[in-house]
Every structure is written in structure tokens, then in C-alpha cells.
Image (cartoon, grey):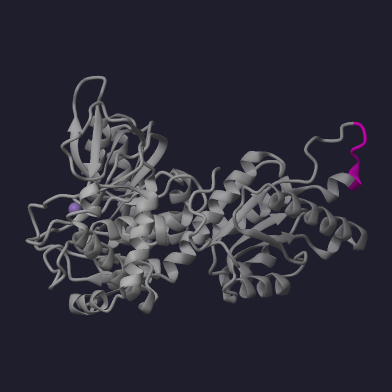
Amino acid sequence: MALANTTLANPFEGKEIWFGVGSQDLYGEEALRQVAAQSVEIVDALNATGTIPVKLVLKPTLKSSDSVRQFMADATSDDRCIGVIAWMHTFSPAKMWIRGLEALRKPLLQLNTQHHQEIPWDSIDMDFMNLNQSAHGDREFGYIVTRLGIPRKIVVGHYTDPEVAEKIGTWARACAGWDASNSMKVMRWGDNMRNVAVTEGDKTEAERVFGASINTWAVNELVSYVDAVKDAQVKELIEDYKAKYDVAPELLGARYDELFTAAKEEAGMVNMMNAYGTTAGVDNFEDLGTLSQLPGVAPQRFPAEYGWGFSAEGDWKTAVLVRIGSVMGYGLEGGASLMEDYSYNFVPGHEMDMGSHMLEVSPSIGSIAKPKLEIHPLGIGGKADPVRLVFTGKPKRGAVVISMADMRERFRLLMDVVDVVEPEGSLKMLPCARALWKPRPSLKVAAECWLRAGGSHHTCMTTSVGREAWEDFARIAGVELATIDEHTEPRAFERELELNEIMHRLNNQH
Ligand code: MN
């Protein structure tokens, strides 16, 4: 787990996961003292793994309905708390959890662990069994959470098992993604690209479901922000470009003014987004006012340098996903980016999908070689040649592409698990960023299922977090997630979509 972007603001800083241990008064002082001591040991050990990016905070043992209700109400109202873990060390009669669980408005994880790894075969007696009975207590708790219909992640295993910390860590990332989603403001410059269907959507419903506030600002205002940028800020950005990318010699020579303009646009966009506190943005090449270049390098740098989401053609839904993906993947190798399916390789045995976009794909997903900063003409938009980063995405097994589509009555997330691979040729004539991937289970099945589900051509690719973080996120958000993976079979997938449709219609009847 290499640390990648150490200059980015850490989205986990100051956040907490609250750890609530369930018991009851029946067991007496001595047993409850041991429960508390062993809980400290377990939480300390989990924090010490370094695998869970958000600090776990142990709260006093919960022994009554009133204390559970207070714990859940506090967790719900405290902005530091982004999720709650519940573990029943002993038997905690679950009626005492009802009022608290009904009050909880934060993500929930049910941890089914215990203090001892091995049954002490020769010494186990009734006292030991009474104290260490989470197999029993967690079943009682599981019943009530399921009965109340509250979504939660379930993690089972001894607390020293690395997989337990991994799973809690992935869920903690999803909690941070949810927290970021609920405080997200998305800046739209212009509306959606004319006549395109899938990039449209219900922004009011998106705020209800994801908490993200999505609004439009005039491109004229962006132009005035760009005009107001001081030369020093532009030069600082150009130095950063020179440090991170192979800058084409012409951009440092005869075409320096155009590099200057591109960097000035980045500064203007960043200044405006900072002024309004937005963490995702989207533009539209049909509506750029008097900006001279269609922004290229600027939004390509948003996920990697600022942790922000960005998408093109007015597609705010993908911008939301890229922001969430950036937060969930913070500190891991790889990142999140807008992606778009462009071209297939149908050669038998070499089937793959090439994704790209005319400008906006971010090197946060990793690149095979140092990204090149180049300038080329662009056939659409009617603007000056845009400066853009050109690179090929780095191979990565188990990456995902995920799309959000508005299905009229709900949002559908659709995900394909993919393996990013090296291209089989130079791509030397292609003046834009791209990635090649093998969709699971195969190009043909994945594409058939993608089309069946009505997934977008725009996706968020994440190479940092994989499927599990998005599954955790979707469960927390209560949004449909259809997943295409190595086990997908088209007939079963079609049935799954139909069942999803029925379930979400029934759930949405209140
Ligand atoms: Mn597009």
C-alpha cells in the first residue's frame, strides 16, 4: 500500500469510526470489567494494523436500551463520526437495540469477532463460555438489524486476521466516500451537451439520495476568474508541470503562450472552485464563453492534485463518482478518473476495450510512462488547440469502471470489474490519454450485460479501490448496484436486473 499523493488534503483526518460493544447488566461487575478490557485490546489492535485509514474510537460498553439510544443519537449528530461498528461481546438482548438503531443515520458495520482465537479445549468452563459468546450475541443482533431492514456490512473473523482489518478498512473508505458525498458541492459550467441522453438526470433527487448539491455557474464568471489570475500563480503551476510531466519542447519555446493560457485556466478554475467550496466540477465544450482553450490539463489534474471529481459534457453524475472514488482511494496507489469506452479489440484471445476521452482522463489512475504534456488541435469545440496530458494507463488487476444512470425512478450504479493491461501497439498517433482493459468475464459478455443494464458510456475508473469499496458505498447509499464480474452470465444477469427493478420499486413506495 504505497502512499501516492502526499500533498493532497487527507479526507480521513479528524474523522472517526465509533465502536460500540453490546452486553447487559445480567453478567455482573467482574464480567463487564473483562468485556471492557478485552474491547480496548481489540480496538487497539485493529487501530495498530495501519490498514484502517480512519481511527476507531471505543465507546463505553452498552448495557441498556437508553444507553444504546444515546450512543446512536450521538453518533448520528457528531460530524466527526462517519460510521458505527457494533460487536456483541456477550449476549445483548436485541430489543434494547431497536430505538437506537431506528435513530442511527450513519453507516453500520456488524463485526462478528471474539477475543480468543482458539477454544481453550482443556480449560473452557461455563464462566468462560458466558463471557465469550459473540457467536450467540451477534446472531441476536443480526436478527434485529435484518428485521428492521437496516443495511450494514458484516465482517466475520478473529480480530487478528488481516482480512478482518482489510474489510473494515475498505468499509471505512466507503464511509469517508459517503461523508464526502453528503458534503459535496458540484460546480457545473454550462449545461449538458446538446441531445445526449445518459448525461442528463434529476439533480434534486441526486441531492436527496447522495447529499451532493449540484448547481450551475455562468461560464462568464469562470472567464472573469481566469482573467483575474496573477502571473505568479500561473508560473508556479508551470513549474509543477515541468516537475511532473515531460513537457513538449514547443510548449516551453514557440508555443509558451499557449501553455501559459492552459495553466491560467487551471488557476482560474481552481480559484473559483475554492471560492465556492466545491469538490467536483464539470464543463461542456459547447458552452465555453470567451475561454480561449477547452480545458484539458487543468481538469486532468483535478483528481490527482486536488482530490476533486471532474467530468465532461455536463455529465455531473460521473463527476460525483470521481470525487467519491478519489476520497475512497486516498493514500493508495492509483486513483479515480473519468473514462469513456471508445474502441474494442476483437482479435480472438486479445479481446479488450480501449477507454479514453478527448481531454479529461486523469493520470491519477497511474501511467506506464511519465505523462507527456502536449498541444494538438481538437476537431470540435471551435477553440484554440488545447494543452493536454498524454499517457497510457498502468496495468492493474481488479480495477473497476462504474457508471451512474438515471432510470427515471431511481439511480442505477453499474460496475464492471476489469484488468487494465498494456496496449499491443504504440498508439503513437493518438493525442490523448487512454487505458486498455480486459473486462471480466469477457469483452463480449461484459459489453452485452453493460448494454442490457443501460450503463453510461461515461464511467469513473478506479485503480485504487476495487469492487468491495463501491459495494459498501452503494449499500450505505441504498442505491442499486449491478456488478459484472468473472462470474457473470448474461441470462442470470438479466434476471438480476429484473429482480432489482421489482425490489427498488417496492422499496420506493413509501
Ligand atoms: Mn464523453
- Name the residue nearer the viewer: 415 or 355: 355
Q: Is residue 67 left or right of residue 197?
A: right
Viewer-side residue, 450 vs 199: 199
Magenta span includes 123? yes
Q: Position of residue 88 (x, y in %)?
A: 72, 55
What residue is rendered at 75% in x and 46% in y?
Answer: 114
The vertical placement of 158 against 93, above or below, is above
Q: Position of residue 438 (x, y in %)?
A: 31, 32
Which SS does the magenta portion mostly show?
loop
Quarter of the image with the N terminus in it? top right
**For residue 508, side relative to residue 147 (left or right):** left
In the displayed orientation, state which residue is furthest to the front: 253
Determine if residue 441 is in view.
Answer: yes
Q: Nearer the viewer, residue 324 or 128?
A: 324
Compared to residue 390, the image places residue 25 above or below, namely below
Region of the chain picked out in magenta, as a range: 122-127
Q: Residue 318, image x and y in percent?
A: 29, 57
Determine the image quadrant of residue 146. Answer: bottom right
Q: Is residue 408 magenta?
A: no
